[in-house]
Amino acid sequence: MMSAVIVASIAIAVILGYKTKINTGLFCFAFAYIIGCFALGLKPKELIAFWPTSTMFVILSVSLFYNFAAINGTLEKLSSYLLYACRKFPGMLPFALFFVAVILSVMGAAYFTVLAFLAPITLLICEEAKMDKLTGAVAINCGALAGGNFPTAALGVIFRGLIDSSYEADPSLTALDSFSSEMKIFGLAIVFSLILIAIFRFAFKENRNIGKGITFTKPEAFDQKQKTTLILMLLMMAIVLIFPLLKMILPGNEFIKTVSGKVDVGLVAMCFTVIALLLKLAPQKEVIAKVPWNTIIMIAGAGMLIAVAVQAGTIDAMSAWIGSNVPTALVPIAFSLVAAFMSFFSSTTGVVAPALFPLIPALAVSTGLNPATLFACTILGAQSSAISPFSSGGSLILGSCGKEEDRNMLFNRLLFVAVPISVLTCAVYNLVVGFVL
């Protein structure tokens, strides 16, 4: 009975957040308090201890550092250079746009930041190049999401934290290496995105004359602040990547293992934030103001409510139900479709991943499936419907349309063409992934 109440509270929190436009995390806080303290008998201090401190710190510190690049124009300039470099292959523009978005996301730009920068440019390029706007929208959306899945990127650090948290709930289970798991998600997302973009690029007649008449303007050179910011971004990536990669290559080396355990992306990002402030690469007030507090509140609230669900045994009950009622071979596709449905109306990082990730460790043990594969199928499924016009990504793309007529047409095509094709393609892809991996 209590499990049903908690599941209903999660659904109600999502619906209320969507209907009222109030942060879903706030509703989750309220439900966590009411159910946790008054129904389960938890003490307020025990409930507050469910606050996902580690995940929140990483989001805060990483966003602080990369806000410098967003504010001083480094990301925008980098985007212009990457697009200009692809001027000799106009027929491959969708893939060029995709890789531009991937690189920006890997460099640390948030999903919304990438789309905010690229959506206006992409729609303008589509008009000049006679390319279908839906294809361009899918390309940059896929790139922003796939690149964000990189272990040190905006989404990757969140998912790594959630993977770690899903194992902390049951100490009897052997935890995964979240870095290597996230690398798998990143790789699978890149392959899926290329397949999806190829479908839109070559199956739509609107793209038959793509690339004819397009002109590229050479961007201005990076100024001194942008050059310094770019160097710091590359240096930070090198520091947080080199030792985890060496650990994968040389797992028996104790020195590398020890240093790798000391390198934390959040703490490193905070150190680089101090360096960037000392170098005055952007105003401190603006850098702090751009921290994604809405995302932090959403993830924290959802995390606390999910922790209450774990305490009540809801997660174990749901895991057992899926394990006993869904054929093992279809479990990956089940997670893919459920995640896609949830993500259609809600946030992948704030709702979908915190709700589904805790199911995976125990389910993987009972079914014999690879937990890293299930984590990947969940994320890919959730991201497959992120192009929905009801989602933040879809709405950003629509907001970049200058004409009302174009906006209305793109709304319908996003909803009735892009979403179904993406979700179904992802379901088939995840089914294959489940069998292969």
Image: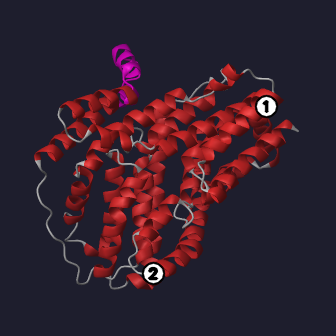
Q: Is residue 391 above or below residue 235?
A: below
Locate residue 134: give its quadrant. Answer: bottom left
Q: Can residue 218 be seen by looking at this rendering?
A: yes
**Please, what is the dominant secondary structure of the magenta stretch?**
helix
Which residue is under mark 1? 313
User: Left of 89 or right of it: where is 364?
Assistant: right
- Residue type pointed to by label 2: Glu
Please tell me how crowded label 1 is: few (under 14), some (14-19), or many (20+) other residues with Cα within 10 Å: few
Q: Are marks 2 and 1 in contact (CB under 8 Å)?
A: no
Q: Which residues are magenta?
A: 243-265
User: Residue 51 at what x, y percent from top left?
Assistant: 59, 29
73 or 181: nearer the eye?
Answer: 73
Locate residue 357: give its quadrant. Answer: top right
Name which residue lies at 43% across and 69% down: 399
Q: Earlier in the sequence, mark 2 or mark 1?
A: 1
On residue 404, the disc is 2
Q: Quadrant of the N terminus?
A: top right
